[in-house]
Image (cartoon, grey):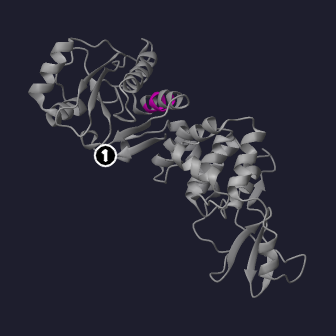
Amino acid sequence: MPFEIVRNDITKMKVDAIVNAANTGLQKGGGVCGAIFAAAGAEWLQSECDRIGTCGSGEAVLTSGGNLPARFIIHTAGPVWHGGNTDEERLLRSCYANSLALAAAHGCESIAFPLISSGIYGYPKDLALAVAVSAIGEFLLEHEMRVYLTVYDKASVVLSEKLFSAIAQFIDDNYIEEHKHFERNRIVFESDFQQYEVHDETISEVVEPVRTHEKTGKRSLQPVVMAPAKTGKRSLEDAVGQLGESFSQRLLRLIDEKGLTDVETYRRANIDRKLFSKIRGGKEYNPSKATAIAFAIALKLNFDDTRDLLGTAGYSLSSGSKFDVIIAYFIEEGVYSIHEINEALFAFHQPLLGA
């Protein structure tokens, strides 16, 4: 089951367990901890914590949820930031790993985390986010659970300055606000690996929206430019009759060619098992664009193969879409971690992949 970054109050999350960013003494604190105590019933929860005693940094303990919608509260004590040289990363990773293991041991199917240690404990938000995404992603490669990282606003999720700047520069270089090359009455569709335009009973090829930088050799998106058809007039019936593989057929073939299992694939794609079953069971199943891209990322497809897979579902990548340009950036950089990509999409106010 997938991982999502959401804007919400963690005390209102309808999940099996929420995680409290606790202190080692399991005493009511401020921030997220104070809010959880207040919502669960402060006196009652403090008495439950007192029975447990303490919780070492990186460890996790469990109480019932009290007045919360969640059945359980998992308390984990994150590390205090001392510059990064006192085992902070290992301890923070342990907070997520131990909390998830405890949730799994109690039969939880869903859990919500805050961004642990990123408040008064001073852990830099971008580094804290990277640890959270990595630890949660590693767990989900082996387990079935819906995991949420809850934040109050998008500003709470901060990419590293270097990555943010690189993506922002890529968007500036490749993102085009207006589609000056399209006419409103044109319909573009893809057939048998080729893109065609249906207009006044004629079909024209579409030049692929990619350019190669002369010095670096890197590929990037460019506006789509229409070229005259090479084969003259064709009927729409003829074009439709030459459709190739469906999305599900192409996807299943690629999974086999990559030597992956179904489970490995849908987990890498941040896709729910039930959704994958629908795709496997229906030759004509047509996914959302985000789902199709998620599978391309899971399969580590290059730009051309990603475009071809999207084409079987009727989609393409465009320089007129900020979402598409960000996806192109990660494919060009060879970064295929779905959760890292979702970090960036969230930071740039774009829809997330998979979930």
**Location of residue 88 with respect to 241 vertically, above or below:** above
On screen, residue 87 versus residue 69, left or right, reads right
**Location of residue 279 with respect to 69 vertically, above or below:** below
Mark 1, secondary structure of its residue? loop
> How many marks overall?
1
Q: Residues within 10 Å of mark 1 (few under 14, many from 20)?
A: some
Residue 45 quadrant: top left
On screen, residue 118 versus residue 162, left or right, reads left
User: Picture coordinates of residue 71 (x, y %)?
Assistant: 26, 33
> What range of the chain is rendered magenta?
129-134
User: Picture coordinates of residue 128 (x, y %)?
Assistant: 42, 29
Kindly identify the residue that appears in the image at 42 percent across and 43 percent down.
5
Q: Amino acid at mark 1?
A: Asn
Q: Nearer the viewer, residue 8 or 125?
A: 8
User: Picture coordinates of residue 153 (x, y %)?
Assistant: 34, 46
User: Quick check: is 16 in the magenta stretch?
Assistant: no
User: Would you name the residue on which mark 1 appears?
Assistant: 8
Kindly identify the residue that appears in the image at 82 percent across and 69 percent down.
242
> Given the current orientation, which residue lies at the most extreme front position?
281
User: Picture coordinates of residue 113 (x, y %)?
Assistant: 35, 33
